[in-house]
Amino acid sequence: MFIDTHAHLDFPEFKNEVHQVLGRANSAEVKRIINVGVDVDSSKKSVDLSRKYPEVYAACGIHPHSANDLDIEANQKLLSITNHPKVVAIGEIGLDYYYLKRVIGMAGDEVVLKEGVVFVNGKKINEPYLRAGERTQVPDVAGGFLSGGVAMTSDGKGFVYNVPKGKYFVLGDNREDSIDSRSFVDVYVNASDVKGKFTYLRFP
């Protein structure tokens, strides 16, 4: 038996085909399907599908593209939806490798990237959230040099970022793949462009 852990049967493309899609899935030994909501409305539709079809279960959540729509009212609606017994996961959130960044330096801070290590105002920062062995390399600083946002350390082995007023220096936790202040042409993120705060619990 197979389980499809990520489907969007509520999308318009499947409006009149859900029954047929489930039939084809069953023929291919896919006996369970988790339909994933991308916002409050589609999360509700996922639960509705799970009520209608025994083999369908629901995941409820907010995709980063819909993050601007997540307010207190939407959050309460979403939490209410997740109480249904066929909601088996929280999604669409996943492991984000693009949108979510960690603020490393704030206005007035000096951030130094040197030999794979991050220093803020002269102190090496502890980063237990990075994967084992992952280091902070500088993939592309050409844009930063052109914009005047980065300079070399005196020994030529590192890069110095002096964070301007109203800006943030950000890095992604997936340090080897992230697009962040190391590769942004303008280097820094405007404080006014920060859309929200992300908090998560990490289980053993």
Image (spheres, rainbow, N blue to C red):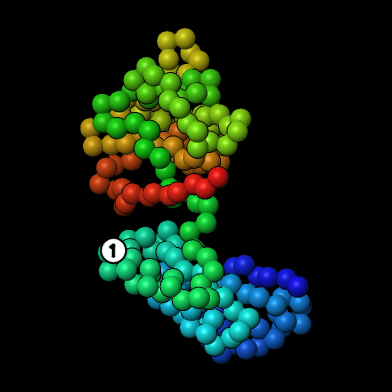
Quadrant of image for the N terminus: bottom right
Query: In the rendered image, is residue 87 in sight?
Result: yes
Note whether 187 is above or below 195 in the view shown. above
Query: In the rendered image, is residue 137 in sight?
Result: no
- Local packing at callout 1 (Cα closer than 10 Å; few below 14, some 14-19, many 20+) is few
Residue 127 at x, y percent in the picture: 47, 31
Note whether 152 is above or below 147 in the view shown. above
Q: How many numbered discs?
A: 1
Residue 33 at x, y percent in the picture: 62, 75
Extreme-left residue of the structure = 165
Q: Which quarter of the picture shows residue 204?
A: top right
* Residue nearest the observer in this picture, 102 or 128: 128
Q: Which residue is mark 1?
A: 71
Residue at the image position 45 percent from the left and 49 percent from the top: 201
Q: Which quarter of the picture shows residue 110?
A: top left
Residue at the image position 56 percent from the left and 78 percent from the top: 9
Note whether 135 is above or below 9 in the view shown. above
Residue at the image position 28 percent from the left and 63 percent from the top: 71
Q: Amino acid at mark 1?
A: Asp
Residue 112 at x, y percent in the picture: 41, 22
